[in-house]
């Protein structure tokens, strides 16, 4: 099958959606499909052979943060050329409602279009204003996928219609086979995420840390991620700061070893999560997970059966749960076992098969994707001769 | 005077273009519904065929065979008005027959049973997908057709008002092919 995938965010900036598309493309290529990914990228960044650059993305303030988006005449022309050259059986657009490549591709294409909605943002004023414009583009999509039941609910509330739920995929065995590293073991709590992004929840964890250290002074907190390390530990008493170790950005291999090593993986995120891939990765590596009770996390952790949950933004509850877990090796072993069994449904073998089922359902008997030529005036008034 | 006339003319042309664009949208939605309906029909037919094949294969016990054959046959023969009910009954029959993992295992062990079980598992997963995509297209078309501009100018022409396909499509848990936790 010839498959075109549209990535809305810059390929050179790491992010959940980009990783998802990379893994999906590579999974489909391994199965013998022809895949081309259209993504914004600087012209001089090295790209994998299956990625086509749609030009440089422009940083624009959008939806409360600076997003790097593609729009304008040049990008639209590149989208059209990609669609024309690719002669795809199906195109798969990610985040079609964000004002970037996804929307442009939706506008320019006709034929079987599959779209995945990743985010579950609260309804923004801009979305309300742009509703009728969006609707005209989004109604071309033949099949919608939401990454979680929560994302589906937001989609239904904001845009109407319905979607099938297919979770994000993880290469479970890659994490399960990683070797633990001795220096990261022994009474360790792990955290992965941007240090300076408050929604990732590191401040909540910092608030809980003194309580944890008071009872278990041997505990260490390992933090992997970008950001200002000085600022992060500012709220801690000086003598406790040495219990926090910053590892900076880590490679995929180290991330797997990190998750294999820690005693408890903590996800104190306070919001803005629609799926929680990191929890799946932690469970794949057999790390007991302690997460805030966001809707998305609750669902990934099977309502708390595959990992512990604490009340969102409640540092005391976090400290109490962390202490209970650290002091109870049996409960940790139980969570390890349940987590490892639970994550099988997120493995690419399952998720990839589901996504292919969607492709096959919409392409059954349909023509290939083509550029959407605007109907000529003569045809509109019924004067054109076929 | 001439200026006013020209402005009226420009306005009328603009309205005409807008209506023609809307008619184009509606036309595209109708063809999307047709494609989605064809896909749904294909999946339903596939499901009924595999069910019937399994029912006549002798892998299942006689009682289960009869229940499954009856439901699959009824679903394939159903008239358009009874289709939703017949397909729902086939879903119920499939759930009753393949309610236990042991039953699915027994089918897989029979010669050629593995392929049949996989095909049925695929079909019971794809029917809800295809139905959801179809009903999503129907909803989009209905939303546009209810709009004033479409009703007043009769942009939908003689196309019938699109109807959602409602049925019970819950797949049997033992067949849903999800690694269980």
Image: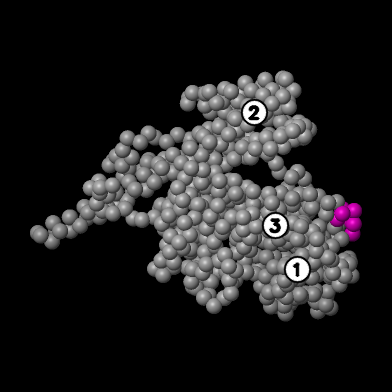
User: How far across and down, in percent of the image, does residue B108 sit?
Assistant: 74, 35
Select label 1 or label 2 by which is in front: 2
Placement of A342 over or under B2, stated as above or below: above
For the residues beneath circles 1 and 3, the answer to whether they share a chain is yes
User: How far across and down, in percent of the image, does residue B167 sit?
Assistant: 56, 31
Placement of B135 over or under A321, stated as above or below: above
Q: Callout 1 environment at 10 Å: few (<14), some (14 to 19), or many (20+)?
A: few
Chain for mark 2?
A: B
Residue A190 appears in the picture as rendered? no
Residue at numbered disc 2: B53
Specify the label residue A170 is tagged with.
3
The disc, 1 or 3, on the residue closer to the chain's N-terminal end is 3
Residue under the point 43% across and 52% down: A110
Disc 2 on helix, strand or loop? helix
Q: CA distance from mark 1 to mark 2?
A: 48 Å
Residue at numbered disc 1: A253
Chain for mark 1?
A: A
Foreground pick, A280 / A80: A80
Q: Which residues are magenta?
A: A327-333
Magenta part mainly helix, strand or loop? helix
Magenta span contains residue A179: no
Q: CA distance from mark 3 to mark 2?
A: 36 Å
Disc 1 on helix, strand or loop? helix
Residue under the point 77% across and 34% down: B109
The outermost residue toward the left is B1
User: How far across and down, in percent of the image, does residue B115 sit?
Assistant: 69, 37
User: How far across and down, in percent of the image, does residue A126 sit?
Assistant: 46, 60
Q: Callout 2 environment at 10 Å: few (<14), some (14 to 19), or many (20+)?
A: some
Residue B119 located left or right of residue A361: right
User: What's the coloring here?
Assistant: one colour
Q: Is the residue under label 2 in contact with that under label 1 (CB below 8 Å)?
A: no
Residue A86 appears in the picture as rendered? yes
């Amino acid at each position: 099958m010839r498959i075109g995938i549209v990535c809305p965010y810059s390929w050179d900036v790491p992010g959940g959606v980009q990783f998802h598309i990379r893994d999906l493309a590579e999974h489909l290529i391994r199965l013998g499909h022809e895949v081309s990914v259209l993504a914004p990228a600087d012209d001089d960044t090295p790209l994998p052979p299956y990625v086509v650059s749609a030009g440089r993305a422009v940083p624009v303030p959008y939806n409360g943060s600076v997003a790097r988006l593609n729009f304008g005449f040049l990008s639209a022309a590149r989208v059209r050329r990609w669609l024309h050259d690719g002669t795809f059986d199906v195109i798969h657009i990610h985040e079609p409602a964000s004002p970037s490549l996804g929307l442009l591709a939706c506008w320019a294409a006709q034929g079987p279009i599959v779209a995945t909605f990743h985010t579950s943002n609260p309804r923004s004023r801009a979305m309300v204003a742009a509703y009728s414009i969006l609707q005209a583009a989004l109604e071309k999509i033949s099949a919608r996928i939401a990454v979680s039941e929560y994302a589906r609910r937001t989609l239904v509330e904001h845009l109407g219609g319905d979607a099938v739920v297919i979770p994000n995929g993880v290469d479970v065995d890659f994490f399960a086979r990683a070797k633990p590293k001795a220096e990261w073991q022994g009474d360790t709590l792990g955290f992965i995420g941007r240090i300076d992004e408050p929604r990732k929840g590191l401040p909540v964890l910092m608030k809980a840390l003194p309580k944890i250290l008071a009872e278990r002074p041997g505990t260490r907190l390992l933090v992997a991620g970008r950001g200002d390390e000085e600022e992060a530990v500012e709220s801690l008493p000086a003598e406790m700061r040495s219990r926090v170790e910053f590892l900076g950005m880590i490679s995929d291999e180290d991330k797997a070893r990190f998750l294999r090593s820690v005693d408890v993986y903590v996800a104190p995120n306070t919001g803005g999560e629609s799926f929680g891939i990191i929890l799946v990765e932690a469970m794949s590596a057999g790390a007991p997970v302690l997460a805030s009770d966001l809707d998305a996390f609750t669902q990934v952790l099977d309502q708390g059966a595959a990992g512990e949950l604490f009340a969102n933004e409640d540092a005391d509850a976090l400290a109490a749960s962390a202490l209970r877990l650290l002091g109870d090796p049996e409960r940790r072993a139980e969570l390890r076992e349940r987590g490892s069994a639970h994550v099988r449904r997120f493995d690419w073998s399952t998720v990839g098969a589901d996504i292919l089922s969607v492709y096959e359902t919409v392409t059954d008997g349909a023509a290939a994707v083509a550029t959407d030529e605007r109907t000529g005036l003569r045809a509109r008034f019924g004067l054109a001769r076929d | 005077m001439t200026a006013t006339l020209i402005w009226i003319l420009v306005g009328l042309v603009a309205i005409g273009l807008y209506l023609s664009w809307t008619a184009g949208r509606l036309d595209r939605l109708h063809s999307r519904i047709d494609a989605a309906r064809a896909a749904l029909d294909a999946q339903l037919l596939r499901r009924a065929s595999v069910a019937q094949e399994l029912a006549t294969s002798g892998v299942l016990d006689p009682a289960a065979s009869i229940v499954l054959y009856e439901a699959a046959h009824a679903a394939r023969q159903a008239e358009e008005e009874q289709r939703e009910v017949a397909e729902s009954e086939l879903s119920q029959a499939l759930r009753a027959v393949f309610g236990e993992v042991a039953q699915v295992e027994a089918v897989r062990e029979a010669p050629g049973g593995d392929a049949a079980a996989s095909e049925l598992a695929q079909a019971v997963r794809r029917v809800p997908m295809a139905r959801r995509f179809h009903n999503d297209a129907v909803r989009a078309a209905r939303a546009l057709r209810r709009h004033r501009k479409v009703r007043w100018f009769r942009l939908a022409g003689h196309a019938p008002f699109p109807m959602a396909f409602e049925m019970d499509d819950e797949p049997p848990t033992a067949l849903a092919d999800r690694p269980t936790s």
